[in-house]
Image (cartoon, rainbow, N blue to C red):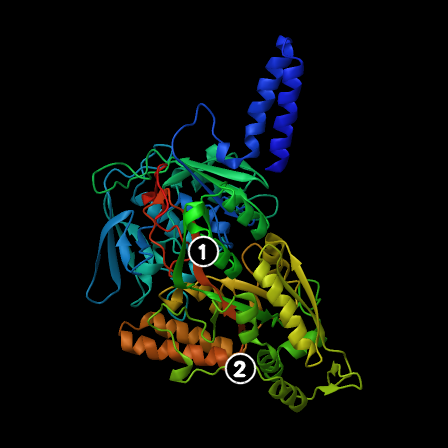
Amino acid sequence: MTTCVTIRQTVLQTFQLRSRSFLMAGFICLLLLLLSGCRPANFRSQAVQGSQLVLSALTDPKTFNYANNQSFPNIFLFTYEGLTRENGVTGEIEPALAESWEISPDQKRVVFTLRKGLKWSDGHPLTVDDVVFTYRDIVANPEIPTDGKDSLRIGSEGLFPQVRKLGDRQVEFLLPEPFAPLLRATAAPDGILIMPKHALEETLRTKGPDGNLKFISTWNTDTPPDQIIVNGPYLLDSYTAGQRLVFRRNPYYWRQDDQGNPLPKVDRIVWQFVESTDTQLLRFRSGELDIMGDSRPLRPEYYSLLKREEKRGNFRVYHGGPWSGILYLAFNLNKAQDASGKPVVDPVKSRWFNNLAFRQAVAYAINRDRININLFRGLGVIQNSPISVQSPYFLSPAEGLKVYAYNPEKARELLLGAGFRYNSQGQLLDAEGNRVRFTLLTNASNLVRVAMGAQIRQDLDQIGIQVDFNAINFNTLGDKLSTTRDWDAHIIGFTGGIDPHGSANFWMSNGASHYFNLKSQPGQQPLQNWEAADYEKEIDRLFIAGARELDESKRKVIYAEFQRLVQEQLPILLLVNDSALMAVRNKVEGLKYTGLPSWGLWNIQELQIKDNAVAH
C-alpha cells in the first residue's frame, strides 16, 4: 500500500517536470494503469464491470479436480453442487440439483428427480448420466482416491449404492441395507459433488506412465481455468499462483431468487492468497478485503480489535457460536513398513506413540485452559468430544465422557508406571534409555496453531519430554500426512457437522483421511504389515452400526459409545477449538452466519453488494 503511493508520487513529479514530452506522458499513463493493480480493490478492467467480492485464503488451492481434494478451503465451495445441500443455519437437508426424492418403506431404495433444464458452465446439459457417472465411475472406482467415497461406504463390506438411470430426470439408488446418512452424503458442501461426464469420461479409459488413471492427473492447478467445467454459482476466470484466483458468475447456474432473478448476485469473486493472518488483517482494515474469517474463524485478538472499529470501519463482526469440527494433536501410530521394508515410523518412537499410557500422559500435561485464556482470549471452546457441539449426538463430560484436565503430576505417574524413567536432569527416558524426543508439526499460516504448538512444547518440557516444534507450509504438511507419512506428531483441524458419519473418512480405518494410521491409498505404493488396532476396528463397527440404524435414540447410544472410546484410547488428543468469528463489510448483504457449516459463506449465491451501505 505504502509502496504503491510512493511510486505514484514519484511518477507524477516526473510527469510535471517533463509535461511537454508527449512520449513520456503516454508512458506515465500506462504505468499508472499498471500500478492500479497494487490494490486488489482496483482489480477490475474496463471489460469486466459489476459487483465484486474480495476474499482471502492462507494458501493456494492444491487441485482443481474434486476427486483429488483433501484440503479446506478449496475451489469446490464456489464451483460445484450436489444432489442436495445442507442448510447452514438449520442443518436440514434441502433440494439442490435434485428437486425431490422418494425413499421406499424399507429404506433401501431412493429415487432422486433432477430439476428441469440444468446445464454445465459450458452450456452442455447436466443430466442423470452425469449423476450415474459421478457415483458409479468416480466415487465407487477403487482406482480413484476421493475422500468422498468413505462417507458412502455401506455395511461391513463397505459396498456402494447401485446407481442407475430410470428416465430423463430420475436416478435410482439401490442400497444393500438401510443407510441413515445417505441424504447428507449427497449434500454440498461436504458431500458428493456432481462431475461432468462429457468432459471427464475419456480420462477414465486410459492410464498415464505412472500406471494411474489419467483422471487423477486431470484438472490440476496448471490447467487453464477456462477448461474447468462446473455446475455451481461460479466458474474459474483466472489464476495467478501465489497471488489470486478470480471467479465469475456461471451464466448457466440454475438458482433464482424469490423474484425470479438469476443467482448469484455478485458478479465476481477475487480470492487472494495471503500466507499471513496479520497481513490479511491489514488488508481488511485498509478496505482491500470485504470479508475476513469465512474459511477459518478470526483470531480472538482480531475479534476484540475489530469489534471496537465496527462503526468507523463500516463493517460488522459476527459471533456465530462454537465452530464445528475439531482441533487436535495426533501421533503417528502407523506400524507398517514401506515397499523397501523401512518402517514408516522410527520403531523407538513408535513404541512410545502406541503406548496408551504415554498418550494419556501427554493429554494430562497439556494445559488447555491456559491455551484458551492466552491464545483464544477466553473465546475458545475446550474440546473433549470428537463430535461437533451442534450435533444431536454430541456427548458432554456431564454425560460420562472422560476428560483430561491439566495434571502434570498424573502425567508423570502414568509415565513411570509404563516403564519410563527420569535422569538426573529431569529428562524423560524410555526403558531402554532413549531420550523421549519427537517432532511436532503444524501449518505455519495459522498463527494460533503456531502459538499453541509453542505452548505445548513448554508444557511437555515440564514432564521431561523434548519437543522439536516446526511450523511448515500447509500443502507440505498435507503431503506428509496423506502421502509420505513422514511425521511424528501434528496439530491440525478437521471439519465437522451434524452427522458423525460425515467424518467417516477420518475415523474409519480404511478412510483416506485416517491420518494417525493411514493405510496405502489408491495410486500409492503398498505398505507392508499395516494393521488396525483393536479400538480402530471397534470404531469401524460403531460407524457401520450407526449408519445402519434409523432409530435416532439408538443412534445416539452408538455414537455416545464412539465418543467414550475415543477419549479412552486417545488416537487423537483434542485441544481447544475456535468460536465462529467473522468480519464483514456492511455493503455485503444476505449473509446467514453460524458456526455449523464448515464455510461461513455457505449461501454465497445469495449475497449481494450494496455500495451505499453505512454503519449501523
According to the picture, the residue beneath numbered tag 1 turns out to be 307
- Residue at the spot x=33%, y=53% of the render? 592
Residue 147 sits above or below residue 465 on the image? above
Tell which of 134 and 593 is nearer to you: 593
Q: Nearer the viewer, mark 1 or mark 2?
A: 1
Residue 416 sits above or below residue 204 on the image? below
Q: Quadrant of the N terminus?
A: top right
Say which element carries label 1: helix
Residue 49 sits above or below residue 199 on the image? above
- Residue at the spot x=20%, y=39% of the render? 259
Tell me the number on the disc at residue 62: none
For marks 1 and 2, the one nearer the N-term is 1
Tell me the number on the disc at residue 405: 2
Residue 465 in the image, given as x and y percentages of width and height: 70, 77
- Residue at the spot x=50%, y=75% of the render? 536
How many discs mark residues in the rendered view? 2
Residue 336 visible in the shown view = no
Is 455 positioned to the left or the right of 550 in the image? right
Residue 360 in the image, given as x and y percentages of width and height: 58, 82
In whole angstroms, how far apart are the C-alphas of marks 1 and 2?
A: 32 Å
Tell which of 280 and 386 is nearer to you: 280
Badge 2 local density, few (<14 within 10 Å), some, or many (20+)?
A: some
- Amino acid identity at mark 1: Lys
The quarter holding residue 572 reads bottom right
Residue 25 visible in the shown view = yes
- Amino acid identity at mark 2: Ala
